[in-house]
Image (cartoon, helix red, strand yellow):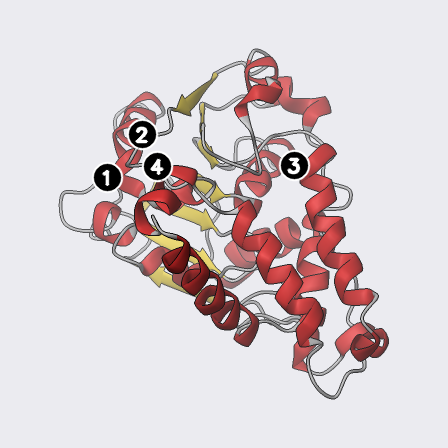
Amino acid sequence: PLRLHYRTLGKPHRSAGRVDNAVLILHGTGGSGAQFLQDRFAGELFGPGQPLDAQRYFIILPDNIGHGESSKPSDGLRAEFPHYDYDDMVAAQHDLLTQGLGVDHLRLIMGTSMGCMHAWMWGEIHPGFADALMPLACLPVAIAGRNRMWRDLIITAITADPDWNKGNYRNQPTRALRNAAGILMIAGSAPLQMQKSYPTREAADAHVDEALARMVSGFDANDLLYQLGSSRNYDPSARLDQIGVPVLWINSADDFINPPELGIAEREARRLKHGRFILLPASGATHGHGTHTWAAVWKQHLLELLAESSPAGS
């Protein structure tokens, strides 16, 4: 059986026969719901008087399939674990809400990175289930170009390592995982932040050694392969114009994974009925792809979305 772990803050409230205060927040590749409890996120959003005050909202933070404390290859099945994809992950999220928590409606779906992509899928697969969508740090098109390539580089590095042994390794293939960690570090980096934090050759070299050791120690090769592979058939672009609820979509200009020069976001945003795209300029406050969890940078926009999408009388 599938195990789907989750955390909640606050309590559900019902009005006119359905839950009216539930907020689903979805994490990125390799993450878990626990990441949203960090001060940079929870400390800006969940406290008294803040945009998603947990005394007012019922906040749901799942660990998606293959992540955190939910079912994943490293639990024991290894390479025999079913090859899940984003459709499976969204279906499990829906089951968690409706069958596990009794939530039949969402005030908001917010997602970061992979969760951002899941938010688009929710808007199309379950129209009207949420009052509003807030995708952060992604594009609503098939993963191609450089975004596909860095994922392929990691997958190839692991599967080509003899120590991987077709997923039946006794010890982690650390050489391949070190290469994977390096790619992930660059993909998630922010140039201004890195230059500020590591302004000398010695500081930069020391950070590489520390960061790679820390990242590799937290990896399982099969889990990482499955996480990256799960995006293989993602492409919500065909039905973007069918999303009927307000959408506030935010990327940052220093995002390596979703570079603004592609122009994809501006093109696709024009197809949204009730949506707008905001590109945050690179600054000392942005953190590359990871800007999605530095809520102070964009929480004012969240307040605007909540006001815009507020049901009549609430």
Q: Residue at 56% x, 71% y: name it.
A: 216
- Circles 2 and 1: CB atoms closer than 8 Å: yes
- The quadrant of the picture occupied by the C terminus is top left
Residue type beneath disc 3: Ile
Residue type beneath disc 4: Thr
Which residue lies under the disc numbered 1?
A: 51
Q: How far apart are marks 3 and 2 (CA)?
A: 22 Å
Residue 227 location in percent, x, y? 66, 58
- Circles 1 and 4: CB atoms closer than 8 Å: no
- Name the mark on residue 306: 2
Q: Distance between the residues labelled 1 and 4?
A: 20 Å
Residue type beneath disc 1: Pro
Q: Distance between the residues labelled 2 and 1?
A: 8 Å
- Name the mark on residue 125: 3
Q: Earlier in the sequence, mark 2 or mark 1?
A: 1
Residue situated in front as seen by the camera: 109 or 18: 109
Q: Categorize mark 3 by other alpha carbons within 10 Å: few (<14), some (14-19), many (20+).
A: some
Residue 140, by quadrant, is top right
Residue type beneath disc 2: Leu
